[in-house]
Amino acid sequence: MIKNLVVAGGGTLGSQIAFQSAYFGKNVTIYDISDQALEAAKGRIEKLETEYKNYFNVDQSVVDKVADGITYSSDLKEATADADLVIEAVPESDKIKESYYKQLMEVIPDNTLIGTNTSTMLPSHIAQYVGEKDLYRFSATHYANHVWASNTFEIMPVQETATETTDALVQFANETGLTPVVLKKEQAGYILNSLLIPWFYGGLRLWADDIADPAEVDKVWMIDLRVKRGPFAEMDVVGTRTVLDITKRDFGDSDDKTMLKAIDKLQEMVDNKEYGRETNKGFYTYPNPSFMDVKIAEMDK
């Protein structure tokens, strides 16, 4: 049974993984590289209290207790000493992930399970940093943004992952309010991001080539598909920093002029701290983004 969880990386999704797990009774520690990063994580946890209070319709005292129960550490050895599972949620940078796993494998206890929440990298790629002898306890463990509502948990084992590891992760998902989905084999982007990322890139191309503004792109998508958000509103949820990292990885060394323009425009947003929902400024301004004014027809009966 997985009782003690360490989340490595207290960013947008890492904080959500931590709060979701703590809300459902797990002992949770957030590890990050500095006290400054941990203070930022504490701020994200505080904001999540409101989300969980409203979504689950519980008293403030309930979410206060959850938040107060989460511990924080910038010492990886100390953080993982009693961990049953460590889930990595560091930025989508190969260099950062390699550095993290090099440190982790020097200190992690022998029986601790190892998960990665990478959105875009194959677990077999990250496996090189884990090491062959430890792959039996390693798997990709992917959460969707807004974990409390979009509560899928995609498990993507590598060939060497033990059945017992996969079974333990399925049980952990069920115990923490998630819907486990075990993929049969590796797929870049899992199920969700295999569909989501090309959608983002379609919007970015229209924006970068000055074909349409983000609000117009989202309007067409929302009205014609009768959904609550278009690609740019969804990118604000994911965070423009994450979108920039992914787009740089896929197109930064290419000769795709349109996507290189998109990278430049995203970089300007990130430089201006227009991170999306996290800073209340991205493609839209919050708390009252203009896409909320779009009128969506009722679904067909």
Image (spheres, rainbow, N blue to C red):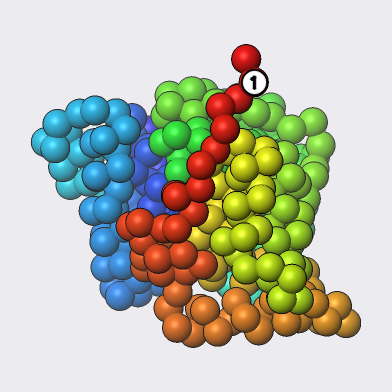
> What residue is shown with label 1?
300
Q: Please state which of residues 185 and 43 is positioned toward the viewer in this rendering.
A: 43
Q: Is residue 224 left or right of residue 173?
A: right
Q: Disc 1 on helix, strand or loop?
A: loop
Residue 9 is situated, as x and y percent measured from the top left of the image, at 44, 61
- Is any part of residue 95 visible from this angle? yes
Residue 50 is situated, as x and y percent measured from the top left of the image, at 24, 44
Residue 295 is situated, as x and y percent measured from the top left of the image, at 51, 42
**Quarter residue 179 falls in:** top right
Which of the image's four quarters has the N terminus? top left
The crowd level at tag 1 (other Cα within 10 Å; few <14, some 14-19, many 20+) is few
Question: Looking at the image, which residue sits at the far left?
Answer: 61
Residue type marked 1: Asp
Question: Looking at the image, which residue sits at the far right?
Answer: 255
- Is any part of residue 83 visible from this angle? no
**Quarter residue 164 falls in:** top right
Q: Please state which of residues 18 and 215 is positioned toward the viewer in this rendering.
A: 215
Residue 53 is situated, as x and y percent measured from the top left of the image, at 24, 36
